[in-house]
Amino acid sequence: MPVQYQITIKDLPVEERPREKLCRLGSQFLSTSELLAILLRTGFQGMSALQLAEHLLAAAGGLRGLLDLTVEELSAYPGIGMAKAAQIKAALELSRRLAIAGLTERPVVKSPSDVARLVMEEMRHYDREHIKAVLLNSKNAVLAVETVHVGSVNSSLVHPREVFKAAIRRSAAALILVHNHPSGDPHPSQEDEEVTRRFREAGELLGIDLLDHVIIGDGCYYSFREKSCLLWAEK
């Protein structure tokens, strides 16, 4: 019989390994199979954990199928077993409870400080600039906080469609643009002002209000609206 070599996550380039990719970019940039591979940790009979995750999702018909399986049914799948099945079911149940909590416990944004509290502890530690959109309904309750760009906040690189596509998908009435300064100093640059101007104009055309642009520093923030910037002159 030919020798079978075990394929592992370590055989992948570092930048493609799910755990390292999550730490570098954030969990939102991983595919479902990559997230599942992190839970599985190890593969089975010549398959890496990532390949096992892909096979499992295909066999179950996706995440919805995994949710419907019992621990016993899941553990019967080759390469899973009781321990991995329990880990998967626990993660899915946490996600389900979080979704339910989100329906009844949506935070309401009333001021820039509310926005800062919502994202500060996560964004103050990023070593690269991230742009997030805080999507709001007509009562300023948070529908979602979505990462829409990672990298320098440059008006030639960041296009409004990246942000407003997320707002349209969520049927948001308004949004607040948020990004971080890895230096820890939240004061805006000329590029920040240009991005703010472009996004506000795009929002006016689409009928989705850009309520503010908040820059996160290390334990501090800058709000264009709070600072009465000319970009936000009242009509």
Image (cartoon, rainbow, N blue to C red):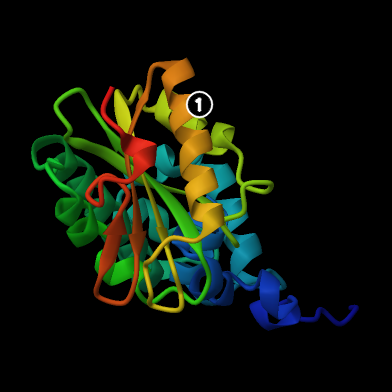
Relative depth, front residue between 225 and 99:
225
Residue at horizontal 11%, vertical 42%? 110
Position of residue 90 relative to residue 111, above or below, is: below
Give the side of residue 62 with respect to residue 173, left or right: right
Relative depth, front residue between 80 and 91:
91
Relative depth, front residue between 220 and 163:
220
Give the side of residue 113 with respect to residue 67, left or right: left
Provide residue 39's location: percent of width, then percent of height: 43, 69
In the rendered view of the protein, which quadrant contains the C terminus? top left
Other-residue count near label 1 (Cα within 10 Å), few / some / many at <14 / 14–19 / ≥20: some
Position of residue 117 relative to residue 207, above or below, is: below
Q: Quadrant of residue 2?
A: bottom right
Residue at horizontal 43%, vertical 60%? 188
Provide residue 202's location: percent of width, then percent of height: 50, 26
**In the rendered structure, which amino acid carries the disc numbered 1?**
Ala
Q: Outermost residue toward the left?
A: 104
Provide residue 88's location: percent of width, then percent of height: 36, 61
Residue at horizontal 48%, vertical 27%? 201
Residue at horizontal 49%, vertical 75%? 23
Give the side of residue 220 with respect to residue 48, left or right: left
Position of residue 93 relative to residue 18, above or below, is: above
Provide residue 31's location: percent of width, then percent of height: 56, 53
In the rendered view of the protein, which quadrant contains the N terminus? bottom right
Q: Outermost residue toward the right?
A: 2
Mark count? 1
Q: Quadrant of residue 210?
A: top left
- Give the residue pinned by disc 1: 202
Say if residue 8 shows up in the picture.
no
Say if residue 137 shows up in the picture.
yes
Relative depth, front residue between 221 and 117:
221
Q: Quadrant of residue 212?
A: top left
Element class at badge 1: helix
